[in-house]
Image (cartoon, rainbow, N blue to C red):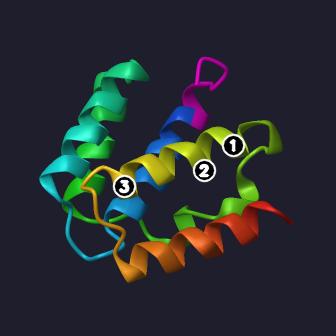
Amino acid sequence: MDTLNTEDRLSLMRFVCSFAWADFEIQDEERSFIGKLISALNLQPAERAQVDEWLKVPPMPEEVDPTQIPRKHREVFLDTVKAVVMSDGVLDPDEEENLKLFVELLSY
């Protein structure tokens, strides 16, 4: 994650929040994971505020286009998205389907 610039870090958080919403609610464990990720990425106050908004209302679908993720960052995005959906110990069918689609889109 050290190679992500500011725009890429915010994009990662957009995807993470989007996947946390896959089952239509954010679990406490997912929220905790996202909080730790915010700290690990050293997000600035405005970026943190944006993530807080995504925790209230998910990002719009057009804001989470996997084909726009730079190839060099795709593995980081995928690993992080997998980690957030598994943070509550349950892989909901909607989360599983979204992950499969995400992997397919990243493989183009």
Q: Is residue 6 magenta?
A: yes
The magenta-colored residue range is 1-8
Q: Residue at x 23, y 45 (%)?
A: 52
Q: What residue type is labelled 2?
A: Leu
In what element is the residue under mark 3? helix
Dot label at residue 78: 2
In what element is the residue under mark 1? helix
Q: Residue at x 29, y 65 (%)?
A: 90
Q: Estimate the spatial distance between the alpha carbons at disc 3 and disc 1, rounded to whole Å.
A: 16 Å
Q: Name the residue under label 3.
A: 86
Q: Which amino acid does label 3 sit on?
A: Met
In what element is the residue under mark 2? helix
Residue 49 is at least partly visible in this image: no
Please indicate whether residue 31 sits to the left or right of residue 81 in the image: left
The answer to whether marks 3 and 2 mark residues whose Cβ atoms lie closer than 8 Å is no
Query: Of tags 3 and 1, which is closer to the observer?
Result: 3
Please indicate whether residue 22 sits to the left or right of residue 26 in the image: right
Q: Does the magenta stretch include residue 95?
A: no
Q: Foreground: 86 or 102?
A: 86
